[in-house]
Structures are given as structure tokens and as C-alpha cells.
Image (cartoon, rainbow, N blue to C red):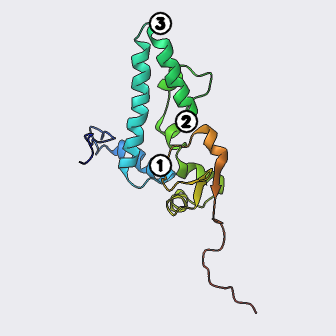
């Protein structure tokens, strides 16, 4: 009965949330990527930190022990489009939060469809007007893989008329 796994947070809050520089940086990032709240930003920060921690842990291993794990990590990040095929662990250590936010479906729709704002792109995604292949995806935080990017289709004219009222003719 019920879910056997224990639910836990998928993000970590910053230690000090009221520093002015951090508040301004977070607010700018929220606005430029159209995030709904800081929790979405903190999830992205936690995910990038997890990738970087894995790379740091691999660097501490001997070369025999890390070759397979390193190739697996690089392959998964390459599939997401975060690093290139010829990347190394140093490239993973240089990942930024913006790199991960650029791979969100909302951001890619904003760039591909030419929406007026990231918030409009989010609305288009949430209302189910975007599909990848034959699957409708209404999650703006969906991380688009490299091979899925050309399959993104928009099912509505985003930049069309804003009202459905007929235009008066003279």
C-alpha cells in the first residue's frame, strides 16, 4: 500500500538566503529563464552540484577504477547536451547553472518559437501545445536531450493575433 520509497527534497536551499548579491543574482536568473519560484532554481543548482561532485569523486580515484565511470558520466551529460563528445572531467567541473537551464524545454521553446517572453514560452508548454516526436510534454522543466531537440514541434501559432475577435473592416 502506498509508495515504498521515502520522499525527500530534490533541492538544497542556500545556507544564507538573505544576502543582497545572491538575491539580486537569483532574481535576474528567475526573470531571464522564466522560472516560477526559487525552488526551481535551487533544483537546477543542486543538479549541477551533483554532476560536479561526481566528477570530483572520480578525479580522486585511480585511473583503472575511474575509466568506466568517467565514460558513463560523460556519455550521460553528452546525451543531455551539457558537454561535448570530446569533453573531460574538467569540463564537468566548469558547468554552470545557466548551462542546465538552457536545456529546459521552456528555454528551447522560447528560442525556437520566438515567443515574446520566457513566461509566454512556459504558458505554451504548460497548455500542451508542444510535443517532442509524438509525445505531448507539458513540463517546462523537462531536460531536452540532444537527439530530441530537432523533434520539438509547436502545435499553435504563438505569434498570431492575441485576441480571437474579428477585426473591423471599413
Instruction: Please tell me which of labels 1 and 2 falls first in the chain.
Output: 2
Residue at disc 2, secondary structure: helix
* In the image, residue 168 above or below residue 105: below
Residue drawn at x 44%, y 21% is 55
Q: Nearer the viewer, residue 79 or 50?
A: 79
Give the spatial CA distance, label 1 vs label 3.
Answer: 37 Å
Q: Are marks 1 and 2 in contact (CB under 8 Å)?
A: no
Q: Which residue is mark 2?
A: 80
Give the spatial CA distance, label 3 vs label 2.
Answer: 26 Å
Residue drawn at x 65%, y 74% is 161
Where residue 81 appears, x then y in whole percent? 58, 35
Instruction: Please tell me which of labels 1 and 3 falls first in the chain.
Output: 3
Quadrant of res 59: top left
Q: Which residue is mark 3?
A: 64
Give the total number of marks visible in the rendering. Answer: 3
* Other residues around mark 3 within 10 Å, as few (<14) / some (14–19) / many (≥20): few
Where residue 114 appears, x then y in whole percent? 64, 57
Give the spatial CA distance, label 1 vs label 2.
Answer: 13 Å
Q: Nearer the viewer, residue 122 or 147?
A: 147
Where residue 65 appears, x then y in whole percent? 44, 9
Q: Are marks 3 and 2 in contact (CB under 8 Å)?
A: no
Residue at disc 1, secondary structure: loop
* Other residues around mark 1 within 10 Å, as few (<14) / some (14–19) / many (≥20): some
- In the figure, is residue 48 to the left or right of 148? left
Residue drawn at x 76%, y 93% is 170
Q: Nearer the viewer, residue 21 or 130?
A: 130
Q: Which residue is mark 1?
A: 141
Instruction: Please tell me which of labels 3 and 2 falls first in the chain.
Output: 3
* In the image, residue 104 above or below residue 67: below
Amino acid at each position: 500500500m502506498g509508495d515504498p520509497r521515502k520522499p525527500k527534497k530534490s533541492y538544497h536551499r542556500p545556507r544564507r538566503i538573505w544576502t543582497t548579491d545572491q538575491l539580486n543574482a537569483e532574481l535576474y536568473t528567475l526573470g531571464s529563464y522564466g522560472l516560477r519560484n526559487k525552488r526551481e532554481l535551487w533544483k537546477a543548482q543542486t543538479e549541477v552540484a551533483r554532476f560536479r561532485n561526481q566528477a570530483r569523486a572520480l578525479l580522486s580515484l585511480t585511473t583503472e577504477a575511474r575509466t568506466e565511470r568517467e565514460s558513463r558520466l560523460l556519455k550521460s551529460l553528452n546525451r543531455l547536451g551539457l558537454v561535448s563528445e570530446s569533453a573531460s572531467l574538467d569540463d564537468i567541473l566548469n558547468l554552470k547553472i545557466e548551462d542546465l537551464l538552457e536545456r529546459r524545454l521552456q528555454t528551447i521553446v522560447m528560442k525556437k518559437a520566438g515567443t515574446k517572453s520566457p513566461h509566454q514560452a512556459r504558458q505554451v508548454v504548460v497548455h500542451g501545445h508542444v510535443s517532442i516526436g509524438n509525445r505531448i510534454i507539458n513540463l517546462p522543466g523537462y531536460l531536452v536531450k540532444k537527439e530530441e531537440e530537432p523533434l520539438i514541434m509547436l502545435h499553435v501559432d504563438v505569434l498570431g493575433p492575441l485576441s480571437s475577435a474579428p477585426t473591423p473592416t471599413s
